[in-house]
Amino acid sequence: MFCTASSSHMLHSLNMKPLELLVIDESAQLKECELIIPLQLPGLRHAILFVDHCQLPAMVNSNVSARAGFGRSLFERLSLMGHSKHFLNIQYRMHPLISFFPNSKFYGNKIVDAPNV
């Protein structure tokens, strides 16, 4: 089953078998409040956050909200609390000539190009 964070509320009304695992992609861009609904799915036991910490963070338009911490992602909170992270270092999307710049500029040359790109 796949859905967006904004449509995850509909999963609560479906007559389906409980999900034990929730996989959240681009989770650094989601504010904590945007994950409250999917994280309350019945039977949920595990959540995996996929994040590129060098991409856009969660955004808020209000300075007051930003100062209050409402722009923080769950990934950011868990990182600050010391939860473990696993760095995926193989990229499959770009030709090596294209990946050279972001790899050297943002990732400290830790990214390896897959042999098939």
Image: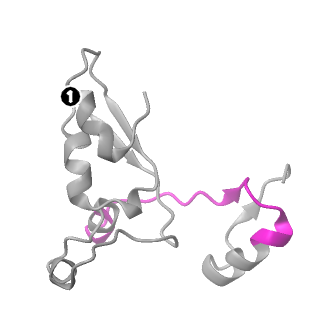
Residue 11 shown left or right of residue 91 in the figure: left
Q: Position of residue 100 (x, y in %)?
A: 78, 75
Q: Position of residue 92 (x, y in %)?
A: 73, 53
Q: Is residue 65 above or below residue 38?
A: below
Residue 29 shown left or right of residue 67 in the figure: right
Residue 81 in magenta stretch: yes
At mark 1, the secondary structure is helix
Task: Specify the quadrant of the image occupied by residue 111.
Answer: bottom right
Q: Residue at x 27, y 70 (%)?
A: 72
Q: Which residues are magenta?
A: 78-99
Q: Residue at x 20, y 28 (%)?
A: 12
Q: Is residue 102 above or below residue 44?
A: below
Residue 24 shown left or right of residue 34 in the figure: right
Q: Position of residue 15 (x, y in %)?
A: 24, 14
Quadrant (top left, top right, bottom left, bottom right) of the N terminus: top left
| Residue 44 visible within the image | no
Q: Position of residue 53 (x, y in %)?
A: 48, 69
Quadrant (top left, top right, bottom left, bottom right) of the C terminus: bottom right
For disc 1, the marked residue is: 12
Q: Is residue 102 above or below residue 3?
A: below
Task: Specify the quadrant of the image occupied by residue 11.
Answer: top left
Nearest the viewer among 75 and 38 is 38
Nearest the viewer among 9 and 86 is 9
Q: Residue at x 73, y 55 (%)?
A: 93
